[in-house]
Image: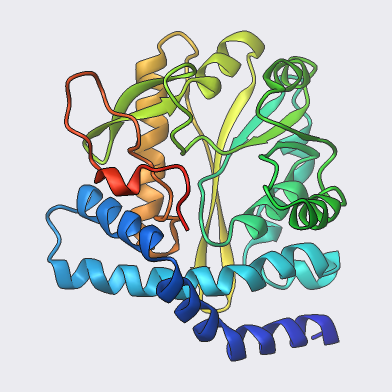
Amino acid sequence: MSLMLHLLNLLEILFTKLIAFFFKKFGKIRRKIAHRNLEVCFPEMEEVDRSKILNKHFFRLGASIFYGLKAWLLNKKDFEKLLINLDEFDFDKLNESSQGSLILIPHTTDLEITGRVAALMFDVNAMAKKQKNKLVNNFIFSWRGKYFKKILFPNEVLKSMRLLQKGESLLYLPDQDYGYDHSIFVPYFNVPTLTVKFPSIAKKRSGCKVYYLYLEKIKNRFKIILKELNLSGDNLYEDLSLLNKNIESSIKEQPERYLWIHRRFKHRPKNSQDIYDESLLRKRLY
């Protein structure tokens, strides 16, 4: 084990609980959002069991800082030590298609590791949001830029589509509420939920292959799960319902790792009741 990997593992052990406590103590509104999301998605579950997931989730949030550092700072050899089954995949075959590949990943606490895994498997471009803090933004994007070909922003959808049409690969996160303009309501945990149209439209316009990539955490390492999704590109509702079912399935396997602090149900269908209390819908959350 290299000195860097050993140091990051040690820091993770020493400080994860402290950071998790900080998030729980000072992120009260985010905690309420996460609690409400769990109520909506797991109504059949006892409250005590949802609370256990929530407590584990904040622990994972604490660890997420170190997952990010591992994704950014580890060299290729040491990063690959985190992955259990990387050798099961034929990278040449994944990248040989002239169709282009859209790789969809969910928002998890080990998101940065998943992104770098995608970059190992595909010669991939990525779409990502800018961070509000300029210093944090510059740090994160400078490291992401070392393994992604290009990083595009949400307002560069046409550029993203052209990359897919040219046969390139694109990493995209489809599981947030991006508002009414570019989304439709489809079931998500049996709740009508705004889901972004881009994956289905990208399939229709570029003919790209569509993959769903997520990681399963096993002790201190990760198992890679990669599925090709059979989106038609001809039916938005069916395509996005299939996508949401796959996201649901991966969440249920290890629910504490999903990013429950996002307001996934922020916008509601006309004449339906809000899911979040008004205090949780304000713009400033901390």
Total of numbered circles in the picture? 0
How does the figure colour the protein chain or chains? rainbow
Quadrant of residue 7 within the rendered picture: bottom right
81 up-or-down from 8: above or below:
above
Which quadrant is the N terminus positioned in? bottom right
Counting from the top left corner in percent of width and height, residue 250 is at 40, 51
* Residue 33 seen from this side: yes
169 left or right of 179 in image: right
165 up-or-down from 179: above or below:
above
Counting from the top left corner in percent of width and height, residue 114 is at 63, 54
Say which residue appears at 17% left-offset and 32% top-offset.
Answer: 273
Say which residue appears at 72% left-offset and 24% top-offset.
Answer: 100
48 or 36: nearer the viewer: 36
120 or 258: nearer the viewer: 258
62 left or right of 161 in image: left
245 or 92: nearer the viewer: 245
Counting from the top left corner in percent of width and height, residue 166 is at 80, 17
68 left or right of 275 in image: right
Say which residue appears at 22% left-offset and 48% top-offset.
Answer: 40
